[in-house]
Image: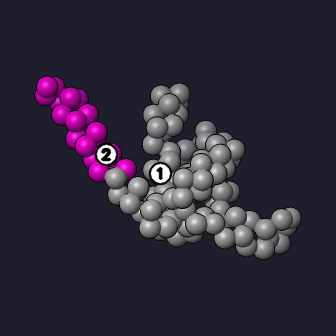
Amino acid sequence: MGKQVTEMLKGTLEGVVLAILSDRPAYGYEITAWLRDQGFTDIAEGTIYALLVRVERRGLVDVEKVPSEKGPPRKVYSLNAQGREYLEEFWKTWTFLAERLEQLRKGGR
């Protein structure tokens, strides 16, 4: 199941990360650690950082640099209004797909 989960997650990871940020601001390592705690052990930290750069460029998150005890300041990401709209649309799309897939699984056409 590992490779299949990884492939399916690629298409939804952006929405998953935005959903995490809808609860509270976080920095990249925190997001990666939370996902790993939830069983997504194959997610590379670099994948999350690249995704965060993309959503920042698209204006879906706000970024605050917070001093770190070790090294340079951390970038803490929080979901902004545009990101919340995007996340709402993500959940609508997810619900649509999940309902259709469940219908298909049960043999409905």
For the residues labelled 2 and 1, the Cα–Cα distance comes to 13 Å
Give neighbour class at mark 1: few <14, some 14-19, many 20+ (Cα, 10 Å). some
Q: Is residue 80 magenta?
A: no
Towards the viewer: 106 or 93 = 93
- Residue found at the far front of this picture: 58
Q: Quadrant of residue 101?
A: top left
Image x and y of residue 13, in percent: 50, 45
Element carrying mark 2: helix
Mark 2, mark 1: which one is toward the viewer?
2
Q: Is residue 68 visible?
A: yes
Instruction: Indicate whether 89 appears above or below 104.
Output: below
Specify the quadrant that holds the C terminus: top left
Q: Is residue 104 magenta?
A: yes
Instruction: Indicate whether 68 appears above or below 10.
Output: below
Dots 2 and 1: beta carbons under 8 Å? no
The answer to whether residue 100 is left or right of residue 7 is left
Magenta-highlighted residues: 90-109
Q: Is residue 33 visible?
A: no
Q: Residue at x 49, y 67 (%)?
A: 80
Towards the viewer: 36 or 87 = 87
Main SS of the magenta part reads helix
Disc on res. 16: 1
Q: Residue at x 37, y 50 (%)?
A: 90
Q: Residue at x 54, y 53 (%)?
A: 58
Instruction: Indicate whether 8 appears above or below 18.
Output: above
Q: Residue at x 31, y 45 (%)?
A: 93
Q: Which residue is mark 2?
A: 93
Disc on res. 55: none
